[in-house]
Image (tube, rainbow, N blue to C red):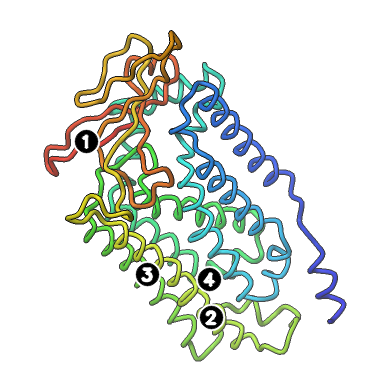
Amino acid sequence: MPPVWQADLGSWTWRADVLGILALLAALYIRGWVTLRSRRHRAAASGPELLAYLSGLGITGIALLSPLAVFQRYLLSVHMVQHELLIVVGPPLVLLGHPLAITLWGMPKACRRGIGRLLRGQGPLRRIFDTLERPLVAWMVSAGVLWAWHIPSVYNAVETNGVLHDAQHIAFFLSGLVFWWPVIQAPPFAPPMTIPVCVGYLVAGMTQRAVLGGIITLSPSVLYSHYTLVPRLNALSPLDDQHLAGGIMWFASGLVLLVATLIVIWRAPGDQPDHPHRHQEQAVRFVPSGGRQARGAQPVKSRGGVPPPLVQVDPTVSESPFSLTNVRKSVDRSEAAGICGGCVPRRDRRQKRLRVNLL
């Protein structure tokens, strides 16, 4: 193995800013998760959700701190792997952990209340969430970010400017969150997509990535001149390396989206509700002591004088096909003054289905 490979394979870029942000996000989430568990809200803070969230942060850390961050300067194919981790692997894992709702529980009360006020009703931050969760908007934002950063002049500029490079990675990760949010339905919940719309949404995402990957793969010339100016670490020419990078975008990310599409179809509710693989159509609501019960919710009785967990099951809300716990979590409005991160149901008149909104 060439000495440069040996040196780079063992090098991790321990950037204090990246480590600090990832550590802070993990600490807030774990604190919120422990708080919910200690208050007997175990349905809202499950082990699989914790594992998914921390795995998503771990994948993001690997993309930004591992030898991938070193080799990407020399090989477009490695850079493409890094970007795919930031777009199609890390964000869905993070969202499977319902990060916003649980992280709010990990914040100090004053901070939680301040953010809760911004997320209530028709506030500006809430309107931004509602807009970005619309499938067409989410698809256009994610596709626009991906294509804009792959314009050759922009991409070459990124490789020579550290600040611009960081901005690219942040944009990719955030666009990944925007793309996956309507599919995974993490709080705050958007109007649920029907199965055909969800499948079409994922197929459209797969198609636009395949088109861009095909352009990069089938290009007869080098699109990104930066890689013609750096030392070669293997026998691949810059053009061959570009073709490999395009194939990674074309097929690898397409495989992830294909698997997601198959999961949506497989977990679609059928005519037989007792099928072992069908998801339950239920929601969990947290109701404070003395709080008002949700319409249609099953009452929770105390046993042996021990106060019951503040959890009720509301069968009127269907879950996302990607739910890890087969439930949806929400918090009664009367408890929002204390936690400022709850959800309340309201009827969507257009779809005539119950949607859950974060306050």
Query: Mark 1 or 4, which is nearer the eye?
Result: 1
The CA distance from mark 1 to mark 4 is 51 Å
Badge 1 or badge 4: first in the primary sequence: 4
Instruction: Write down the residue under mark 1.
Output: 316
- The residue at the point 67 percent across, 47 percent down is 18
Q: Amino acid at mark 1?
A: Thr
Quadrant into which the N terminus falls: bottom right
The CA distance from mark 4 to mark 2 is 9 Å
Instruction: Write down the residue under mark 2.
Output: 223
When the figure is inspected, residue 247 is found, relative to residue 200, above or below; the finding is below
Residue closest to the eye, 353 or 275: 275
Q: Amino acid at mark 2?
A: Leu
Badge 4 or badge 3: first in the primary sequence: 4
User: Helix, strand or loop at disc 4?
Assistant: helix
Badge 1 or badge 2: first in the primary sequence: 2
Q: Is residue 120 left or right of residue 169?
A: left
- Circle 1/circle 4 CB separation < 8 Å: no
Instruction: Write down the residue under mark 4.
Output: 153
Which numbered circle lies on residue 206? 3
User: Helix, strand or loop at disc 2?
Assistant: loop
Q: How many numbered dots are placed on residues in this image?
A: 4
Badge 4 or badge 2: first in the primary sequence: 4
Q: Amino acid at mark 3?
A: Met
The CA distance from mark 1 to mark 2 is 52 Å
